[in-house]
Amino acid sequence: MSHGGGESRRLHDKAGHSGKRKLRVSGDEFARAIAKIAVAQMCETVGFQSFQQSALEKFSDVTTWYIRNIGKTAQFYANLAGRTEGNVFDVIQGMEELGLSQGFAGASNVDHCLASSGIVREIVQYIGDAEDIPFVYSIPPFPVARERKPVPSFFQICGESPGEHIPAWLPAFPDPQTYVQLPAGNEGDAVFNADKIEPARHHLKMDMSSMNLPQHFTCNGSGGPSSVTFGNSARATQWTESNPFLAAPLQFGEKEVSHLVPPARLSDEAAVRYPVEQNRIMDNHISVLETFAPAIEAMKSRFCDSEEGQKKVLLNQRPAVKFKIQVGKNSLAGAPDLSPQKIGIEKISKWFGKDSENDDKKRRAEKILKQSMETPSELGEL
Amino acid sequence: MNNTSSSNSQQQQQSSEARHDDDATLTEFLASLMDYTPTIPDELVEHYLAKSGFQCPDVRLVRLVAVATQKFVADVATDALQQCKARPAPVVKDKRDKQQKEKRLILTMEDLSKALSEYGVNVKHQEYFADSPSTGMDPASREE
């Protein structure tokens, strides 16, 4: 006891120190530190001269747990009685419940009056015996509660809600200009995001697809998987216009060819929208595309003539994405990754070799394009 | 019949009187709480009560919880102190050391967990926790 002041001061230092150390852990350090000081003070009163740090931490933890449990059970009893605010009897009931493991006078009587509960009598007795030792420090009320400014409701703004189905007490809508033009912005965002995300994503996917090619083909017939493997947000917007179930049976070879077709158009379009971003792509590939444009155009028209109108639509739209895949891959991945891709393409061509003359032609054009597309990217790297 | 009913009503009257007394004592006790300053500060109790969802504007209830908690802590600490005193003194080599240890009462995890287990709180001491029993001693021994 003779070291009382010194000890509590030291404790305070320690508590502050540990609080700093655990700053990121819980955010409740101030209360914990105060609880520790209070518990240490009480232990000192009881007769302890010193303590293990871990024991003190545990003890203060249990103490706060005790307070919280009293509050919890008291609130429970208050709610049970149909009230939101607790009163003395709720607190006493909570304390009785916590004291059940210990037992108290009159606990066996279920109908005992709460006002004369054994717990209360014990507390009265304790107060009579115990010394009145106030807390060593004066504490400001905490935590500091900031005034919250709620969003004004319909009622506060104009007195009534815009629709009958909207209660007037709900928070009002934000300014119309914040959401009126949202759809357009969304679309742009989607395309933009697709542009940004696509390279990395499809780089991965192409590798995977070249490795798992056989499986890929087996499930390609159903159409769903193919759309899933190559699905992205830009593609999703196209889906709304074309029937996905018609898109499904589209053969791999067809896709490969078709993706060569529109790049010129696409990159032109895109360049208008995102000049900066598309510049690098154009540097690399536009020349190739332009050289092949007539041949592709001719072949495509021939191919599409034999098909139904809807498929034509599909082909016109689909390639936009496909080509971007290629661009992204080539510009990002460079030479080393081209070999698996090439193997994949060759496998594809083997698969579709017997299919039809159309496919054959497409394959040839594709190969030529492939080779020519490799060179610019390599040059670019050099 | 008449007798029993009258005795019943008498009992009721008595019990109602007793209840009235109880109410009075309870009110008195709550009022007396305002004069008593518990060691656990009101702010701390308020904070944790608010955290547990309990809401009540009455300060006396906060005091009541504070006093109840203080009693709980005091009880546990007393039990731990008894455990500490009942434990055989640790083997010491140095004479001077022995003198010190005999008079030192240290709240250790071992005693605390034993004391708490009686209150329904199971505390398992970490087997390999690096917390030497002399943790709280160093500055004091430095002083001496």
Image (cartoon, coloured by chain):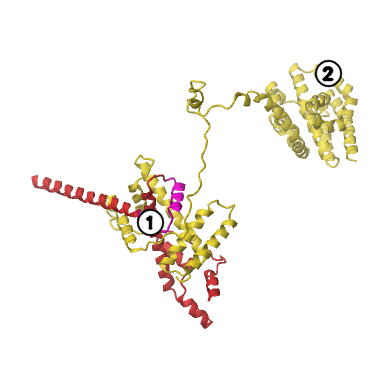
Chain colours: A yellow, B red
Q: Position of residue A143 (x, y in %)?
A: 50, 48
Specify the segment rendered in magenta: B34-53
Indicate the amino acid at tag 2. Ser
For the C terminus of chain A, the image quarter is top right
What residue is disc 2 on?
A: A301
**Which of the two residues, A3 or A311, is positioned nearer the viewer here?**
A3
Q: Chain of mark 2?
A: A
* Relative to A174, B66 lies left or right: left
Q: Secondary structure beneath disc 1?
A: helix
Q: Chain of mark 1?
A: B
**Which of the two residues, A173 or A265, is positioned nearer the viewer here?**
A173
Total marks shown come to 2
Q: Position of residue B35 (x, y in %)?
A: 35, 55
Indicate the amino acid at tag 1. Val
Q: Residue furthest left?
A: B2
| Mark 2 burial class by Cα count in 10 Å: few <14, some 14-19, many 20+ | few
